[in-house]
Amino acid sequence: MNEQRRQVLQMLAEGKITADEAERLIDALERQQPEAPQGTESRAKARPKYLRVVVNAADDSSGDGQSRVNIRVPLQLLRAGVRLTSLIPPQARAKVNAQLNQSGVPIDLAELKPQHLEELIEQIDDLTVDVDDPDGKVQIFCE
């Protein structure tokens, strides 16, 4: 039994919530974290909804010592963006590709397909990026 479910049952036992409220809370927890059937060793991964980028670093410039960046990008936005690249006219796509190449990003937008994004998402479990600062840490993961 997970901790959240235990807390709901504890609140029910203490009379803080009714049985109906406890049932709704437990149902919501089960929808939020579906469990694999017992007896299966590997759990099926839920389809991630967000790409999260977390940056922790010591920051001497502001004087407070720590800086933290925490960005959560909906993967649906990325999926929609990949689909929209097919709507870019060929002349504009050539100009965008040339500018990307000039900036050091050798990507051909004509080759960007939704299945490529899905393959990338499947492979990102927890990526840690090394930075020059020994106290700094960058993490990229899907949730």
Image (cartoon, rainbow, N blue to C red):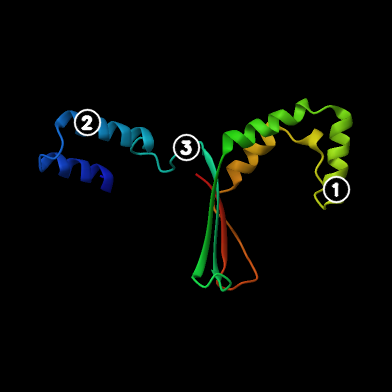
Q: Residues within 10 Å of mark 3 (few under 14, many from 20)?
A: few
Q: Secondary structure at mark 1?
A: helix
Q: Position of residue 138 (x, y in %)?
A: 58, 60
Res 15 → quadrant: top left
Q: Nearer the viewer, mark 3 or mark 2?
A: 2
Earlier in the chain: of badge 2 and badge 1, it is 2
Residue named by callout 1: 101
Q: Amino acid at mark 3?
A: Ala
Q: Which quarter of the figure has residue 131?
A: bottom right
Q: Residue at image x 47%, y 37%?
A: 46
Front residue of this view, candidates 64 and 57: 64
Does the CB distance between marks 3 and 1 fall below 8 Å? no
Amino acid identity at mark 2: Glu
The amino acid at mark 1 is Asn
Q: Which residue has dot 2 on it?
A: 23
Circle 2 SS class: helix
Query: Mark 3 sits on what residue?
Result: 46
Query: Looking at the picture, how far across and down is residue 104, in whole percent?
Result: 82, 53
Q: Against 60, is 111 above or below?
A: above
Q: CA distance from mark 3 to mark 2?
A: 23 Å
